[in-house]
Amino acid sequence: MRPSLALLSSSSNMARLTLFTRSPCGLCDTAKHTMTLLRNKQEKQLKEGTTTTECGTQSAAKSESSSTTSSIPIEKFTYSEINITDPGQQQWRDCYEFDVPVLHVDGKEKQKKLFHRWSEEDVLQAMRDVKE
């Protein structure tokens, strides 16, 4: 029997990714797309039970940026988005008004932030960095 995503996400050594965004924001749209690609790959690995091995082959129709991580195992992570212009997000708006998109990568004891532009590989490296 395979564990559910909810059970896996309760793991204390799992990275927690939080994307701070706003609308309209072209860079934020690109960041969301990158995170969607990673989340889809993670879901595929969870379904196949291959979270600690290689992802497998990617469809030729996918973009070059997504195929570059096809042989890289994706660490388990949780993901959320915060729109800094939403009511109740004034703290984050004050902090990141002119810096979005910002991705917080939180590990058990370490944190890393990625600003403005990043690739799937950058996110995977940040997750490895906070895990060490």
Image (spheres, helix red, strand yellow):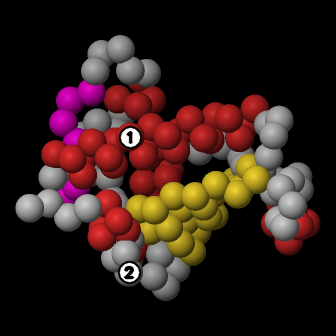
Secondary structure that dominates the magenta span: loop
Crowd rating for badge 2 (residues with CA inside 10 Å; few <14, some 14–19, many 20+)? few
Which mark, residue 12?
2
Q: Residue furthest top?
A: 61
Q: Which residue is drawn at 15% across and 52% down?
A: 49
Q: Residue at x 52, y 79 (%)?
A: 110
Give the left or right position of residue 36, taking residue 9 as reference: right
Q: Give the range drawn in magenta.
A: 51-58
The tag earlier along the polypeptide, 1 or 2, is 2
Viewer-nearest residue: 132 or 58: 58
Can you tell which quarter of the image residue 17 is in? bottom right
- Name the element at disc 1: helix
Image position of 37 with respect to 106: above or below:
above
Residue 52 within the magenta-colored segment of the rendering? yes
Alpha carbon separation for disc pair 1 and 2: 22 Å
Give the left or right position of residue 116, taking residue 24 as reference: left
Amino acid at pointer 1: Asn
Crowd rating for badge 1 (residues with CA inside 10 Å; few <14, some 14–19, many 20+)? few
- Residue carrying label 1: 40
User: Residue 46's spot in the image, x, y percent?
Assistant: 24, 52
Viewer-nearest residue: 56 or 89: 89
